[in-house]
Image (tube, rainbow, N blue to C red):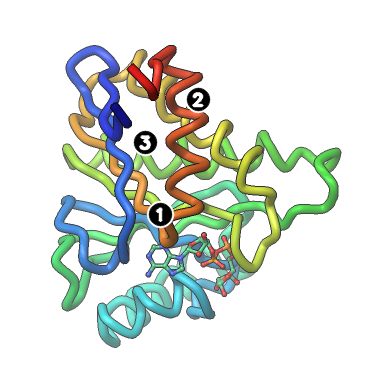
Amino acid sequence: MVRDEFEVGKAKIRLVKGDITEIETEAIVNAANSSLMGGGGVDGAIHRKGGPKILEECRKLRQTAYPSGLPTGQAVMTSGGNLKASKVIHTVGPVWRGGSRSEAELLADAYVNSLGLAVENGLRSIAFPSISTGAYGYPIKEACRVALKTVKGFLETKNHVAVVVFVLFSESDLAVYRRAASEIFKMDIHS
Ligand code: AR6
C-alpha cells in the first residue's frame, strides 16, 4: 500500500498532488524570490488567485523590514487575500549552483523559518510546495530529502503544528516524495 500520511508524534505529514492555491490549511507557503514582488511558478499562481492584497502587504514589508529584499532562507507572512488559506508565508529557497554553495542548509532554513512563523502565530496547519525545485533548479530527489527530514526534525522538537502538507504539482514529483518519505519514515511502500 502506498502511504501518503506519516506520523511524527501527534503531528501528521501528508503528501498530496495538487495546486497549493486550492489547499485549505491555515497557511500556505510561497516559493518566492527576494523581491517579494511576485514571479512565475507557484509564486505567480498564489498572487493571481490571492489578489492584490498580498502584493500590497509584500510591498509594505519591502518598505519597512526588508528594503533590500528578503534574504534566501528567511520567511515573512502576509494575509491570504482571496485564498482559502488565511495566511501566506513567503520564503526564498536557494538557487541550485551545484550543491556546494550551502544550498541544503539554505533550503532547510526556508522550511524551518516558515514553520517557525506558523508556530509564532499559532497556526496549526501549513502546506508547502516543493521549494526551489522549479525555476531555481534544485534536483527534486535531493531537495525532497532535505524538505522531509527538516520538517520531521522540526515536528519532533516542537509540537505546535499539527498538520504539514506537501503539495506536489505532478504525479512524478509526488512519486519522488513518496519514495523518499517511505525511506525516511522507514515504511514499506509495498506492504
Ligand atoms: N501548486 C503547487 N506547486 C506548484 C504550483 C502550484 N500552483 N505551481 C508550480 N508548482 P517554482 P522555485 C511547483 O518555480 O523553484 C518564481 O518565479 C513547481 O512545479 O514555483 O522555488 C519565484 O518568483 C515546482 O515543483 O519555485 C522565484 O523567482 C515547485 O512548485 C522562483 O520562481 C517550485 O517551483 C522560485 O523558484
- Category of crowding for the residue at label 1, using alpha-carbon neighbours closer than 10 angstroms: few (below 14), some (14–19), many (at least 20): many
Callout 2–callout 1 Cβ contact below 8 Å = no
- Category of crowding for the residue at label 3, using alpha-carbon neighbours closer than 10 angstroms: few (below 14), some (14–19), many (at least 20): some
- Of 47 and 146, nearer the camera is 146
In the rendered image, which residue does mark 3 sit on?
116
Is residue 161 positioned above or below 95 on the image? Answer: above
Q: Position of residue 121 (x, y in %)?
A: 22, 43
In the rendered image, which residue does mark 2 sit on?
149
- Between disc 3 and disc 2, the foreground one is 2
Is residue 169 positioned above or below 49 on the image? Answer: above
Q: CA distance from mark 1 to mark 3?
A: 22 Å
Q: CA distance from mark 2 to mark 1?
A: 17 Å
Which quadrant of the view contains residue 54? bottom left
Please give the name of the residue rendered at 54% of the width and 39% of the height, measured from the top-left corner. Answer: 144
Mark 1 residue CB less than 8 A from any atom of ligand 1: yes
- Looking at the rendered image, the quarter that the N terminus falls into is top left
Amino acid type at circle 3 is Gly
Amino acid type at circle 1 is Leu
- Of 90 and 23, nearer the camera is 23
